[in-house]
Amino acid sequence: MKRASVKVDRSAGSSGFTRRSRGNKTRDLNITSLIDILTILLVFMIKNISMDASQKNAPEGMLLPTTVSKNELIESGKAVFVKIYTDKILYGAENIPIGSLQDFISSQETRQSLLRLLQMEAKSIMAMHSQPCLLIQADKDLPCRYITEFIKFSAQASFANIYFSTIHSENKEEVLGI
Amino acid sequence: MAYGPSQNRTGSQQEHREPNLIPIMNLFIVIIPMLMTIMVSVHLAMIEITLPAQSAGGGNGEEAEEQVEDLPKMITLALFPDRFEIMVEGDKGVTEIPQLSPGRHDFVTLDKNIAELKLVHEKQGTIEVLPDPTVRFDTLLRSIDICKSNDFPNIKYLTALTKYYRAK
């Protein structure tokens, strides 16, 4: 591979640079095609970009179910996130660990602390004249026992509006399993 | 008095000058990773469910009876690990939709049945969903989605009541 270099002749007169011989001519890298690709990429990305923060919060390590239909959060509603994995429960946007699912079902202490958290959150949301909404993000393999238990539990903490988080798809056949 | 073209101008016309693309490249190198980090690859959606309200009970006379007649019949969809069951208020029969193979529910038949129910009960916009505790969350949400896409926007999530009796 040839190395491109520019020689500066300090001893020369006003021009300063030595002329290259024809065989030593530098070949510039043609980046026009690269610019073309990058321009297409840029346009594609700008088209697909979404600035909605809630759209990005797909929980890590969780497989969400796919649905065609979708609902919007009620007007003046404020959502509280609960992530239910197959082995743990995380509370809020800060992902506060609550315990395992077994703890949630059987441990009175875990249930009490979660209930206190939910009640406090509901109270602070209602103080701002908003409606407390619970957004449940659960793994698709989770048995409904835990979901039912959680819904019953959250109703005790004044969460009347319950939402399930899913991945939105336009393809109904995907939902029907065809 | 007109001057002739300058030496510079004649020089630039003869010499083919390429635009300097390096600043544009620098810009692209910054913008593209930034957009890639904030780009949404999966679109999340929300599915709303409602909790069953406690019935007040009572009612008086003929007026109440007339109102009951006007009310659309309640439709309940029960989800079991091996089948779906659809019950319509007042009907004795239960529509059973068995699974296709172990662990594979028949969502296509469920979709057809729900669509047919909508044709019969046009005014009804609510379906009660009662999942078995062992049913997967995925099955529950697919069923809810099928109901919503067939113009049943309100889904009531039924939770089995647990009653405790204290021995005297």
Image (cartoon, coloured by chain):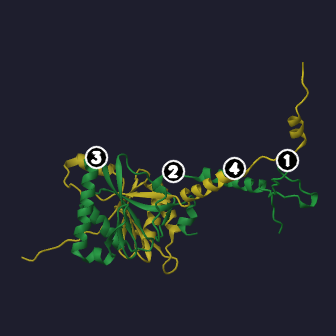
Task: Let me know if marks 1 and 3 both belong to one chain.
Answer: yes
Q: Whole-Å distance between the Cαs marked 4 and 2?
A: 25 Å
Q: To which chain does the residue with label 2 belong?
A: A
Question: How many marks overall?
Answer: 4
What hue does chain B carry in this figure?
yellow
Residue B24 has which mark? 4
Judging by the rendered image, the residue that carries numbered circle 2 is A51
Q: To which chain does the residue with label 3 belong?
A: A
Marks 4 and 2: CB-CB under 8 Å? Answer: no
Task: Let me know if marks 2 and 3 both belong to one chain.
Answer: yes
Q: Disc 1 or 3, which lies upstream in sequence?
A: 1
Q: Residue furthest bottom?
A: B102
Q: Residue furthest right?
A: A22
Q: Whole-Å distance between the Cαs marked 2 and 1?
A: 59 Å
Marks 3 and 4: CB-CB under 8 Å? Answer: no
Q: In front here: B27 or B157?
A: B27
